[in-house]
C-alpha cells in the first residue's frame, strides 16, 4: 500500500511508529456525489447526475470496503448501468495493479492501465495521498466522483431509482438514527477494528483493538439472537456494512490478523446471520474467495513474510440459516 506524492508514486507503508504502534486509516479525498438531478451532495465540490452508462466502478474483490459497493450495485440492479473493472488481488511495491490473471477477471476496462494509481493521476496529475479502492469514475467528465465507500453505497441506494434501479431503500428515513449509531460502533470496532489489530506493531495497540472487537461481536450476537437483522425485520445498510467483514472473519482475520479469541463459527446467531445475507439474491456473485485469501496472505509481507496462503477453514455459506422464524 504505497501512495502518490505530488503525482509521483512512492512505495511507503503506513507509519505506525508515529502512533504508538497503532494503525490509523487515511481519509478519502474524493467526496463528490451522484444525485438524481445532479445537484451537489452532502460533501464535495459538485454534483453528478445519475445517468445509466455514465459511471464506472473500480474495485478489488479482496477489499471489504470495495465489496460494499459491489453489493449495492448488485442488490439495486445497477450492473447494466455501471460497469466495473477489477484490480489484481496482489498488492506489491506498485500498489494495486491490473496485472492479468488466469481467470480473465482482472483488467482496466476503461483505459487499459497497468497500475491503478494511473487512474488517480488521470483525475489529478498532482494528487498526493493513498491510492485506494473503490473508485467511482465519471466517464463524461473524466474524473473521480468518489473514493469513499460509505458514500458510494448511499448514492447507489437511491440516486438511480428514477432511471431503473431495483426497488429497495437500505437507509430508510425512519431508521437513520439507529443505522448511524450502529455504523459508528461497527466501523470503529469491527470493520476497522480487525485492521487495527492486524496492522498493530505494539502489544498495547493490538490489545487495544482486539478486546473492543470481541466485546462488539458479543454485543452483536446477543442482539441477533432476538431479531433477524440489526434493526429488526428489514435488511439495512448497517447489515451490509457488517457483512463484508464478517464473511472474511474466519478465513482471514481470525488467523492472519490475530483476531483469535473466538471464531465467527463460535457465535451461532452471527454465523447464521452471515449465511442469511449471503443467500440473498445477487450477493454470492460479488465474492471471489481466491482473491480474498491470496490478497491478505501474499500481499502483507510484514505480517506473513513467507507468503504461504492458509488453505482452511472450509466454509459453507449455503448451509440453511433458519433465521426466518425470528421475523415471525
Image (spheres, helix red, strand yellow):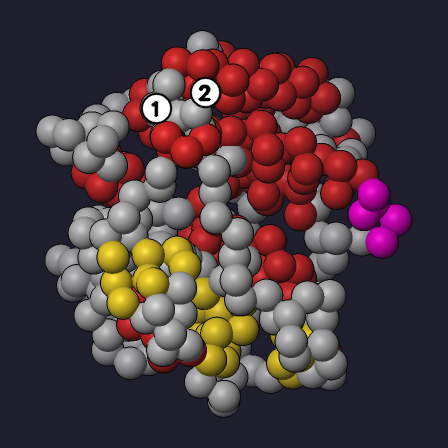
Can you tell which quarter of the image residue 220 is in? top right
- Magenta-drawn stretch, dominant element (helix, strand or loop): helix
Whole-percent x, y for residue 224 in the image: 68, 23
Tell me which residue sits at (26%, 24%) in the image: 312
Lateral position of residue 192 relative to residue 114, left or right? right
Categorize mark 1 by other alpha carbons within 10 Å: few (<14), some (14-19), many (20+). many
Q: Which label sits on residue 205?
A: 2
Q: Is residue 84 magenta?
A: no
Whole-percent x, y for residue 159 in the image: 69, 72
- The C terminus is located in which quarter? top right
Tell me which residue sits at (30%, 76%) in the image: 109
Lateral position of residue 121 relative to residue 33, left or right? left
Q: Which residues are magenta?
A: 173-177
Q: Which label sits on residue 201?
A: 1
Tell me which residue sits at (33%, 56%) in the image: 3
Q: Nearer the viewer, residue 68 or 111?
A: 111
Lateral position of residue 64 relative to residue 324, left or right? left
Q: Which residue in the rendered view is the most extreme toward the bottom?
A: 140
Amino acid at each position: 500500500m504505497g501512495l502518490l506524492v505530488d503525482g509521483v508514486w512512492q512505495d511507503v507503508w503506513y507509519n505506525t511508529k508515529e502512533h504508538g504502534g497503532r494503525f490509523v486509516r487515511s481519509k478519502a479525498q474524493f467526496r463528490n456525489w451522484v444525485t438524481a438531478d445532479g445537484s451537489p451532495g452532502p460533501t464535495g465540490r459538485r454534483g453528478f447526475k445519475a445517468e445509466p452508462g455514465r459511471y464506472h466502478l473500480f474495485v478489488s474483490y479482496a477489499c471489504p470496503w470495495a465489496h460494499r459497493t459491489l453489493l449495492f450495485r448488485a442488490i439495486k440492479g445497477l450492473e447494466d448501468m455501471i460497469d466495473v473493472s477489477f484490480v489484481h488481488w496482489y498488492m506489491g511495491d506498485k500498489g494495486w495493479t491490473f496485472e492479468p490473471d488466469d481467470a480473465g477477471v482482472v483488467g482496466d476496462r476503461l483505459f487499459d492501465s497497468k497500475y491503478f494509481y494511473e487512474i488517480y493521476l488521470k483525475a489529478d496529475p498532482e494528487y498526493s495521498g493513498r491510492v485506494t479502492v473503490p473508485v467511482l469514475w465519471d466517464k463524461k467528465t473524466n474524473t473521480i466522483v468518489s473514493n469513499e465507500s460509505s458514500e458510494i453505497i448511499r448514492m447507489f441506494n437511491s440516486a438511480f431509482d428514477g432511471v431503473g434501479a431495483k426497488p429497495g431503500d437500505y437507509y430508510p428515513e425512519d431508521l437513520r438514527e439507529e443505522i448511524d449509531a450502529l455504523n459508528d460502533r461497527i466501523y470503529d470496532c469491527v470493520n476497522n477494528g480487525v485492521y487495527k489489530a492486524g496492522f498493530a506493531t505494539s502489544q498495547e495497540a493490538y490489545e487495544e483493538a482486539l478486546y473492543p472487537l470481541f466485546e462488539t461481536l458479543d454485543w452483536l450476537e446477543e442482539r441477533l439472537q432476538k431479531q433477524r437483522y440489526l434493526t429488526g425485520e428489514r435488511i439495512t445498510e448497517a447489515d451490509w456494512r457488517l457483512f463484508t467483514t464478517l464473511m472474511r472473519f474466519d478465513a482471514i482475520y481470525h488467523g492472519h490478523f490475530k483476531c483469535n479469541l473466538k471464531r465467527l463459527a463460535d457465535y451461532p446467531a452471527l454465523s447464521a446471520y452471515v449465511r442469511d445475507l449471503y443467500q440473498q439474491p445477487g450477493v454470492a456473485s460479488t465474492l471471489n474467495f481466491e482473491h480474498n485469501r491470496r490478497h491478505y496472505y501474499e500481499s502483507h509481507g510484514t505480517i506473513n513474510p513467507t507468503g504461504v496462503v492458509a488453505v482452511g477453514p472450509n466454509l459453507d455459506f449455503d448451509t440453511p440459516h433458519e433465521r426466518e422464524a425470528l421475523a415471525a
